[in-house]
Amino acid sequence: MGGGPIMVPIFICSVIALAVILERMVSLRRSRIMRSELIEVIEAVRGPEDLQVIFNRCNVIQGPFSNIIKRTISNTHLSREEKVLDIQATGRQEARALERMLVVLEIITAITPLLGLLGTVLGMSQVFDVISEVGLGQTKAFSGGIAQALRTTIIGLGVAIPSLIAYTSFDRKVDNLILEMEKYSMSLLNKIYPSESVVEAIDTGGK
């Protein structure tokens, strides 16, 4: 393929980027995060007397969605406004967990064009050394070197652009998933906080 020694780290970055993209494609599937069993239980809840059922279900089905739901039905001594803030804070924590591998794509997006540029600069330096030896009359002597020098930039961009597209897509998907989880949590919150008397019932039923 040519391009000199800089092609080695660019190739490594491409392999890592591909691995992260495939892993995130599997891990961030909506059906894997937004478990239909939990959604059905939330929709079936009529009041605080049903919360033990959903708590038990969340203990069986682990994941970010169940974590947010458990925060919604715990700490019942908090006011409704405090619970809303608590749900949002939990959502931000779960978002960081879902984004844990995206920083790798972000780094690859930033460094691969720079690696390509470095390869081009090193290649052009060698071309100028050839020119100083054979002069400009022998174009074949340095034209191949120029093509090889530019190849690293092309490959670097070829890795960076798909990585950037994947990073942006996954980042937006995480935001949408968190918003959807918070929506269902708020729906559950509205069912268990209709009045102050419900708080006492929740405390009794959760024991």
Image (cartoon, helix red, strand yellow):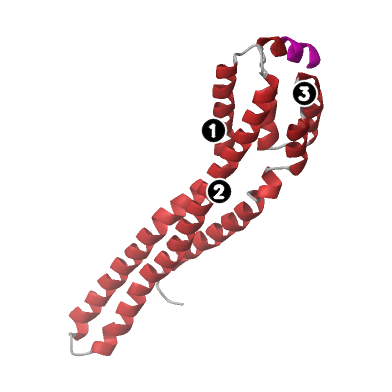
Most common secondary structure along the magenta stretch: helix
Mark 3, residue position: 51
Mark 2, residue position: 173
* Residue at 74% across, 12% down: 203
- Comparing 71 with 198, the one in front is 198
Between disc 3 and disc 1, the foreground one is: 3
Q: Are marks 3 and 2 in contact (CB under 8 Å)?
A: no
Secondary structure, mark 2, is helix
Q: CA distance from mark 3 to mark 2?
A: 29 Å
Dot 3, how many residues are within 10 Å of its Cα: few (below 14), some (14-19), or many (20+)?
A: many
- Comparing 95 with 111, the one in front is 95
The magenta segment:
200-207
Q: Are marks 1 and 2 in contact (CB under 8 Å)?
A: no
Q: With 84 as the anchor, is 62 left or right in this view?
A: right
Q: CA distance from mark 3 to mark 1?
A: 24 Å
Q: With 40 as the anchor, is 195 left or right in this view?
A: left
Do we see residue 100 in this rendering? no
Above or below for 85 versus 115: above
Instruction: State the image coordinates of residue 83 (x, y, percent, origin top left).
Output: 59, 20
- Comparing 76 with 161, the one in front is 76
Secondary structure, mark 3, is helix
**Comes first in the chain, label 3 or label 2:** 3
**Comes first in the chain, label 3 or label 1:** 3
Mark 1, residue position: 92
Secondary structure, mark 1, is helix
Do we see residue 119 in this rendering? yes
* Residue at 73% across, 9% down: 200
Above or below for 127 versus 18: below
Residue type at mark 3: give it: Leu
